[in-house]
Amino acid sequence: MTTAAPWPDHLLSLDEFLALPEDNSRIYELHEGVLIVSPRPAKPHQRVINKLVPILNEQLPPEWEAFGELDLIVQAGEPPIVRVPDVVVAPADDARNVPAAEALIAVEIISPGSYRTDTKIKPMEYSEAGIEHYWVIDLKQPVSLTAYRLDGPVYRVADAVTGKFVTGDPFPIAVDLEELAARRVEGGKPE
């Protein structure tokens, strides 16, 4: 019989969360001091992350960079909140985590079991933290992207887009959503 690592028996502080040993086998988030552990995303989800990051980086100004699965400190004070969006556009530096106030775009890809969190809870948290843009990608056919734009203290939600997502805010960005979710086939072209 193996012995499990000790599990926190109290609400964690931000310092305690950041001191946890690195573990790439799961996604660790902190919600009001409560440690939340989720499985790594499935292949279709990973496919979108792996394609979206370079697509964004090709189009972003040099002072901004897209990162996959980066710790985002949504609330540093008590009780702390740390999320791990699928993609974050943040200043192009080498920080291990990003204060939410520095993030320009947070992107979540809906997974089984994450719909309510991604469409209800995270928009509230991210808008309160001042993240200007929040995108939610739904992989159900047809693949869609819903863009949230900070308008005062809350998000203004645009209609879901299918096919090609094109925006000029905060920068000119275009993403072919069907290609983003398509599997590779022989020769490396999307299916």
Image: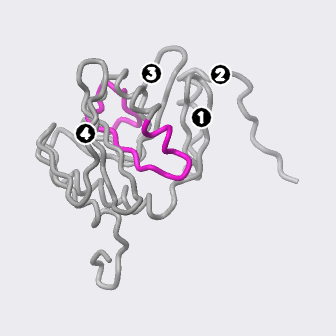
Relative to 55, say whether 100 is above or below. Answer: above
State the separation of the CA atoms marked 3 and 4.
26 Å
Q: Would residue 167 appear left or right of 16 to someone viewing this image?
A: left
Q: Position of residue 72 (x, y in %)?
A: 41, 33
Most distant residue in the front direction:
159
Reading the image, the residue beneath label 1 is 20
Q: Position of residue 6 (x, y in %)?
A: 76, 36
Q: Disc 4 or 1, which lies upstream in sequence? A: 1
Q: Determine whether the residue tagged by mark 4 lies in a helix, strand or loop.
A: loop
Reading the image, the residue beneath label 2 is 11
Q: Disc 2 or 1, which lies upstream in sequence? A: 2
State the separation of the CA atoms marked 2 and 4.
36 Å
State the separation of the CA atoms marked 2 and 3.
14 Å
Residue type at mark 1 is: Leu
Reading the image, the residue beneath label 4 is 158
Sort mark 3 into few (<14), some (14-19) or many (20+) by Cα contacts within 10 Å. Answer: many
State the separation of the CA atoms marked 2 and 1.
14 Å
